[in-house]
Image (spheres, coloured by chain):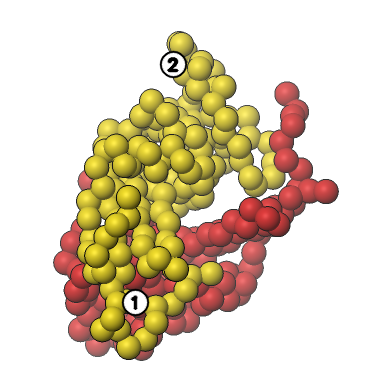
Amino acid sequence: MQSTEPEGAMEVMSEMKCLEILGQHNLGRIAIVVDGQPQIFPVNYAVNGRIISFLTAAGSKLLHAPTSKVAFEIDQYDSLSGVGWSVMVQGVATDATDMFDDVSWAARAVTPRPLAPGAKPYRVAIEASTITGRRFRPGV
Amino acid sequence: MLALQAGHLEILGDVECVKLLRSHDLGRIGLVDRQARPLIFPVNYFFDEGVVVFRTAPGTKLGLAPGAYVSFEIDSWDPDGGTGWSVLVKGIAHDITNPRGAPTGRMRFWPVQPMAPGTRQHWVGIWANEITGRKFRSDAQGPRTRKKAHAIN
């Protein structure tokens, strides 16, 4: 049964490391649950502390994300070095477009830059409750 | 395929979505846990015959995916060309580790190559019910833009 799988090391990253990596990137994916089924959409984001901020048009991301449980993920794989990592944030999304709570203010204090065209007048904040990440490298 | 005008967002047809799924091998699976919370995990996959196949070890994915409605997503962004696309597969996942017939038996020979270390003896297939995709050319780099768009590292 034991096999020819790649040998290497997989390690869990600390929350601090995950937050650092989140701050270095700006393209991730949000998962929302619509009628019991998860859906995944790429979004450009900015991070402020433990809050992920992104802009959206009125569409399924806005209709289903605020106020609901969501996941947000970034990952990267370098085919030359064989090093890969992924970070997942779980939390609650809220419509932060014009609310005056702390989370909404924090979400509006950073500037996500959407790459996809189209007006995106709404802002969504994901307040992280859980942040997990792992990275791996190939064996020798 | 991506001959698009700046600022243009376009729906991808089935043929294009399938072509993209067949020409990539790293995507993300979306699951829902017992508390109705969504989860996202990157997986290496192989796509054919309307089925996304990946391999996994016992754990969260194997615990939640079989029998469940799941999603699978691939995307790409080319900072030089300013173009991006994403494809979303919605479907039902089944554990095909012990094949029950010719189709699932055949899938066990598909070239699914996990890049992450560790033994992955369980095979899971996602039978697509719906495949959607879109592509765009960013207007963030267009002539009216003051700032150059961020490159994504």
Residue at mark 2 shares a chain with residue at mark 1:
yes
Considering only vertical position in the picture, is B58 above or below B115? above
Identify the amino acid type marked 2: Pro
Residue B67 is at least partly visible in this image: no
**In the rendering, at what x and y percent does residue A3 appear?**
74, 29
Which residue does the image show at 38% across and 39% down from the upper left? B19
Considering only vertical position in the picture, is B20 above or below A62? above
Kindly report the distance in space between the C-alpha atoms of the residues bearing marks 2 and 1: 46 Å
Q: Quadrant of residue A124?
A: bottom left
Which residue does the image show at 63% across and 29% down from the upper left? B121
Identify the amino acid type marked 1: Gln
Instruction: Identify the chain of the residue marked 2, using the numbered disc in the image.
Output: B
Considering only vertical position in the picture, is B116 above or below B68? below
Q: What color does chain A have in the rendering?
A: red
Instruction: Identify the chain of the residue marked 1, using the numbered disc in the image.
Output: B
Question: For the residue carrying disc 2, how many other residues have a C-alpha within 10 Å: few (<14), some (14-19), or many (20+)?
Answer: few
Please give the residue where the numbered disc 2 appears in the rendered image: B103
Question: For the residue carrying disc 1, how many other residues have a C-alpha within 10 Å: few (<14), some (14-19), or many (20+)?
Answer: many
**In the rendering, at what x and y percent does residue A103 appear?**
34, 81
Front residue (pair A12, A29)? A29
Q: Earlier in the sequence, mark 2 or mark 1?
A: 2
Farthest-out residue, right: A140
Residue B59 is at least partly visible in this image: yes
Which residue does the image show at 33% across and 33% down from the upper left? B128
Considering only vertical position in the picture, is B68 above or below A124? above
The chain coloured yellow in the image: B
Farthest-out residue, left: A58
Front residue (pair B123, B136)? B136
**In the rendering, at what x and y percent does residue B13 appear?**
24, 42
Residue B141: give its label: 1
